[in-house]
Image (cartoon, grey):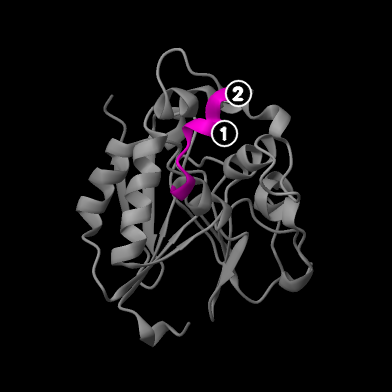
Amino acid sequence: MRAKDYKRLIAVGDIHGQFDMLHELMGKIQPSQKDLFVFIGDYIDRGRRSREVIEFLLNFGKKYKAVFLRGNHEDMLLDLLGLDEKAINGAYYERNGGEFTALSYGDTASSIEDLGHLIPEEHLQFIKNTKIFYETEHYFFAHGGVIPGVPFAEQKREVMLWIRYQFIYYPTGLDKIVVFGHTPQRKVLIENDKIGIDTGAGYFKKLSAIDLFTKEVFQVNYTG
C-alpha cells in the first residue's frame, strides 16, 4: 500500500462491544471509497452490543476498504471455542468481559459456554479471518505492539497481541511507526515511533480513530 493510493489512512481503536459509540464515530469520520481503514482489534466483550459491532464491521468491509486486525479478546474467544490452534488464554475469557458477549448473542440466561452455537457462522468466520498484523510503507499495525529492537519479521504472535509496557515505555528502534491499541490511553498517544489509539471504550470512556496522514483525531465519549 502506498500513501498516494488513498486520501486517508484511518486507524480505529478498540471498540469492545460499544456499538453506539462506533456508529457515532463513523458519523464523524464520514467514510469514503478513497479511504483505507485499519481496525486495531478487540471488537467484542465488556460492552453490551458485540453482536451488532461484528455485524456492522462485516457490512462495513463490504462497502469500504478495510483491514481487521485481531485483538487479544478475539484470540481468547477462538481459543475457548477451539477454533484456532495458535490462539491462547481462552481460560481467561470470562473474566475479561466475555459474559457480555454471550448476553449480546443470546439472552439473559446465556453464558460463555453457549457461545459456540450462539455466534453465527459468518461472525465466527470474520473473527477467524482477522489479521495478527498489517503493514504499509510507513506504518506497522499490531493490537498490542512489538518488542523494541526486534525486526518486524521476527515478532512473535503472542507479543503482537498481548505486549504492553515493555513496548510503550521504550523506543522501538524500528523503521516504521507502530500503531497499536490494547492498552488504554487518556488520549490518543502520538510519538515519533508509536501511536496508541485505545482510549478506553471498553471501560465506558472514549472511542477514537486517527487519520495517520494528517494526524487528525476523531473521538466520541460514552454517554450510556
The image shows residue 170 at horizontal and vertical percentages of 71, 56
Question: Residue sitting at 48 percent across and 18 percent down?
Answer: 110
Side of 72 where 136 appears, left or right: left
Question: Residue sitting at 25 percent across and 58 percent down?
Answer: 29
Residue 92 or residue 207, whichever sits in front: 92
Q: Which residue is mark 2?
A: 113
Question: Residue sitting at 41 percent across and 68 percent down?
Answer: 212
The image shows residue 192 at horizontal and vertical percentages of 56, 67
Residue 198, placed above or below residue 195 = above
The image shows residue 144 at horizontal and vertical percentages of 63, 50
Q: Which element carries disc 1, helix, strand or loop?
A: helix
The image shows residue 149 at horizontal and vertical percentages of 78, 67
Question: Residue sitting at 29 percent across and 42 percent down?
Answer: 220
Q: Which residue is mark 1?
A: 116
**Residue span colored magenta:** 113-122
Side of 176 where 41 appears, left or right: left
